[in-house]
Image (spheres, helix red, strand yellow):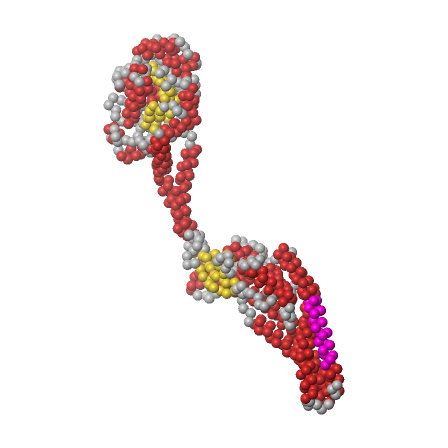
């Protein structure tokens, strides 16, 4: 049982899918037109749209590691993974995408002014190939984009036009337009450039900030992986060489900015050392002058062995005093430098002669933060920016820590100096034992050597700082130079054509779906079965004949056979042919084919040698009487009003083989419903039943009046006509209510006017085509196709 249900469900799904496919394939020309139109539009778009290329470059960011104790704290944090390993790379990415750096590139390449020439359906940009160069002397509104056209005339002048007017100028003359004043400079005039200029060059001058923002959006900076320091730079541009120049210039500007940051510390160190050297140079000159005067005044050429021995003994103490004094001077200079409010935004010079790791680490961190703050300010950040404020807070804390460290080191250095002075005092006492002349000489010589050693030391440090400045290299290395994709990345022709093809398919599908969705009429047997459980007794195809009678002697058409099938199905309604005597034919509204069904069903019974009477009980609109030409014949309304006898009513129809009779409606009465309730109606029906084998009641639509319901007591079977593509779905629900409430005996449905070739024909695996029956086979092939549409 379950297997059979599954098979039935599978078959139903297959039928539904076939139904949907066939319904849409019937309108294949819609799809063909839609695809052709969309492919043509795609073709136009590809010839109008400007191709976009992608330029790429790769840049390695060098990870710098400190030496000695300067980065001891950073090394510990890195080992503990407390500092982001890629933080430096993220900073460099932000710098590359900064407004400041990109503005430098735009200014250097003069990208605010672009030149275009008409090339087919699109405008082609002339990068470095424009026959003219425009120099902006003055703009009326610097915030608006300016567009004008420059065209070379036959007489050699240039015609400059914009929306508000034009100007005729010669070479190297100024064109005065409403948007500003522009100098026209021809470039490399020749046949090729002149022919290009005669076509007309469109000049577009865009505000600088807008150009920079546009390039910032087009520029992409990414890393190859989370742990990598290699940056991929991409730029989307319509001109390949323009994109290459932009990335190359951007990288150069980035490297130059990095070198400037690195040289800043060395420059401050050299400046500090130069100040100390200048001061010591003066002191050393003074002492050397004193020594020279002393020796000249006493005619001294050299010291004896005793003086030389003493100098060797005190030399070590003097050197230590020099180092400690220099250390104290450097500490005092650092303290004064850091305490000076005017130096708050500058880096602290190198701590010459200071080997304390804590102070060196604090100064190094302080200088790194100053560099980072300077980069943020250059990138456009203000002093009230949260990031800048955070750096200022850290700098304030580091200045306090540096001052405290310097204070501690000054105290330690002062203690060392005091100890060395004590030793020096001892040697001074020894000197007093030397003759006064020699003692004075030694004192001056010692001062001279102290200053000289300190002077040489500072000169050495200055050279080291200068060498460091000269040997500074960029913090990045170019891996891949700027290179453009050989083919445009957009628009992608294959994708555009595929999208156009799919849209060409989807639009007709959507239109057909919307059409079906908005259509509230019956289009298939399945739709009838979805709204009611009333049985469908027969299906009648669309008649292409001009005659209302299609069931004739010898007729072998499809529609004639369908009426015969309907007649047979009525026989099986109750089991025997004799049990069905009276048939009621009605519909929900007029125009659904009641009269057509009544005439041809009656004709079918007549051809089966049955005496048939058709009653035109649509007293309000006697359409059947008009069709049969019986408008003036006495009818049912005359009889029910007592104006005619039973014998006067039936009239024989000429096409019924002397078996078919028609009882017309008669004149339209003012009270049809009341006449139907007349007791004479009972006598009429009984009389007809006794004299005829089949009685057909052609009644008015039940959706308009109640006449048909008043006649249900006389009938055995009720045929409810539903016309294909005419009857509303809501009207079928009325049939469902009547069937459930059993207001009509043996209520059945007849589907009428089913057009050949419609999607309806595929609902149940069969159709109502032509050619099987001999009458239909006589029609021409193309005529049948035309009629099926």
Q: Which quarter of the figure has residue 7?
A: top left
Q: Residue at x 60, y 63 (%)?
A: 73
Instruction: Give the mark count.
Output: 0
Looking at the image, which residue sits at the far bottom?
299
Percent position (x, y) of residue 529? 38, 27
Dominant secondary-structure state across the stretch colored magenta = helix
| Nearer the observer, 656 or 62 | 62
- In magenta segment, residue 182: no
Residue at 31 percent of width and 31 percent of height: 766
- Foreground: 289 or 762? 289
Q: Is residue 452 visible?
A: yes
Q: Quadrant of the C terminus?
A: top left
Indicate whether 42 appears above or below 593. Answer: below
**Residue 201 appears at what percent x and percent y?**
47, 58
Residue depicted at x 28% and y 16%? 610
Q: Is residue 175 left or right of residue 499?
A: right
Q: Kindly tell me whether residue 183 is visible in this rendering.
A: no
Residue 726 shown left or right of residue 413 in the figure: left
Which quarter of the image is occupied by the N terminus? top left
Q: Nearer the viewer, residue 784 or 577?
A: 577
What span is colored magenta in the figure?
A: 406-427
Q: Is residue 24 left or right of residue 62?
A: left
Q: Quadrant of residue 726?
A: top left
* 230 vs 678: above or below: below
Q: Residue, x 59% and y 68% (percent of image)? A: 68
Based on the picture, tell me whether residue 421 belongs to the magenta stretch: yes
- Residue 90, how many percent across, how many down? 54, 58
């Amino acid at each position: 049982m379950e297997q059979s249900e599954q098979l039935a469900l599978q078959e139903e799904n297959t039928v539904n899918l076939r139904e949907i496919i066939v319904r849409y394939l019937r309108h294949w020309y819609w799809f063909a037109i839609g695809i052709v139109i969309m492919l043509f539009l795609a073709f136009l778009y590809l010839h109008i749209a400007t191709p976009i290329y992608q330029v790429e470059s790769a840049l390695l960011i060098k990870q710098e590691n400190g030496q000695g104790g300067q980065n001891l704290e950073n090394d510990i944090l890195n080992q503990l993974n407390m500092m982001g390993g890629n933080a430096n790379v993220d900073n460099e990415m932000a710098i590359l995408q900064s407004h400041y750096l990109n503005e430098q590139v735009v200014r250097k390449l003069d990208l605010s002014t672009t030149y275009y020439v008409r090339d087919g359906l699109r405008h082609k940009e002339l990068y470095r190939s424009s026959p003219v160069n425009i120099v902006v002397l003055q703009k009326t509104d610097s915030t608006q984009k300016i567009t004008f056209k420059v065209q070379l005339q036959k007489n050699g002048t240039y015609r400059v036009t914009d929306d508000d007017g034009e100007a005729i100028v010669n070479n190297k003359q100024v064109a005065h337009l409403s948007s500003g004043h522009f100098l026209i400079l021809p470039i490399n005039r020749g046949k090729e450039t002149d022919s290009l200029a005669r076509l007309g060059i469109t000049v577009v001058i865009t505000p600088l900030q807008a150009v920079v923002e546009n390039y910032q959006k087009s520029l992409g900076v990414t890393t190859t992986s989370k742990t990598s320091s290699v940056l991929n730079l991409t730029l989307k541009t319509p001109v390949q060489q323009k994109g290459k120049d932009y990335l190359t210039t951007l990288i150069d500007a980035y490297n130059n900015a990095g070198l400037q940051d690195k040289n800043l510390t060395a420059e401050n160190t050299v400046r500090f050392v130069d100040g100390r050297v200048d001061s010591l140079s003066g002191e050393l000159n003074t002492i050397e002058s004193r020594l020279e005067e002393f020796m000249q005044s006493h005619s001294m050429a050299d010291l004896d062995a005793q003086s030389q021995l003493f100098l060797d003994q005190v030399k070590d103490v003097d050197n230590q005093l020099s180092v400690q004094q220099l250390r104290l001077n450097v500490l005092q200079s650092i303290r004064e430098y850091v305490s000076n409010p005017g130096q708050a935004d500058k880096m602290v010079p190198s701590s010459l002669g200071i080997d304390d790791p804590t102070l060196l680490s604090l100064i190094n961190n302080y200088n790194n933060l100053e560099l980072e703050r300077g980069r943020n300010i250059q990138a456009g950040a203000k002093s009230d920016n949260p990031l800048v404020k955070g750096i200022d807070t850290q700098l304030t804390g580091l200045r306090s820590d540096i001052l405290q460290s310097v204070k501690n080191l000054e105290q330690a250095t002062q203690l060392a100096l005091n100890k060395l002075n004590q030793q020096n005092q001892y040697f001074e006492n020894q000197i007093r034992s030397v003759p006064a002349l020699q003692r004075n000489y030694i004192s001056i010589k010692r001062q001279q050597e102290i200053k000289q050693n300190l002077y040489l030391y500072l000169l050495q440090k200055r050279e080291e700082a200068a060498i460091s400045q000269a040997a500074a290299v960029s913090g990045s290395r170019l891996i891949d130079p700027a290179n453009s994709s050989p083919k445009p990345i957009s628009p992608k022709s294959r994708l555009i054509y595929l999208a156009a093809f799919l849209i060409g398919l989807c639009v007709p599908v959507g239109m057909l779906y919307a059409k079906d969705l908005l259509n509230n009429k019956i289009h298939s047997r399945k739709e009838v079965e979805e709204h009611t459980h009333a049985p469908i007794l027969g299906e009648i195809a669309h008649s292409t004949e001009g005659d209302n009678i299609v069931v004739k002697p010898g007729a072998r058409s499809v529609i004639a056979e369908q009426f015969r099938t309907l007649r047979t199905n009525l026989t099986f309604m109750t089991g025997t042919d004799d049990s069905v005597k009276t048939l009621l034919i009605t519909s929900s509204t007029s125009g659904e084919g009641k009269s057509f069904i009544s005439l041809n069903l009656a004709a079918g019974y007549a051809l089966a040698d049955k005496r048939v009477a058709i009653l035109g009980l649509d007293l309000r609109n006697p359409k059947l009487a008009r069709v049969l030409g019986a408008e003036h014949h006495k009818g049912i309304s005359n009889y029910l009003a007592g104006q005619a006898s039973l014998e006067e009513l039936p009239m024989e129809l000429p096409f019924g083989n002397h078996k078919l009779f028609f009882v017309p409606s008669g004149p339209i009465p003012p009270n049809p419903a009341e006449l139907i309730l007349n007791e004479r109606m009972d006598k009429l029906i009984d009389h007809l039943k006794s004299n005829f084998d089949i009685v057909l009641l052609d009644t008015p639509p039940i959706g308009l009046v109640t006449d048909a319901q008043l006649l249900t007591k006389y009938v055995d079977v009720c045929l409810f006509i539903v016309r294909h593509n005419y009857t509303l779905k809501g009207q079928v629900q009325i049939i469902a209510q009547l069937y459930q409430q059993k207001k009509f005996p043996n209520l059945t449905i007849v589907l009428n006017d089913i057009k050949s070739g419609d999607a309806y024909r595929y609902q149940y695996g069969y159709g109502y085509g032509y050619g099987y029956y001999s009458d239909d086979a006589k029609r021409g092939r193309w005529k049948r196709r035309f009629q099926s549409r």
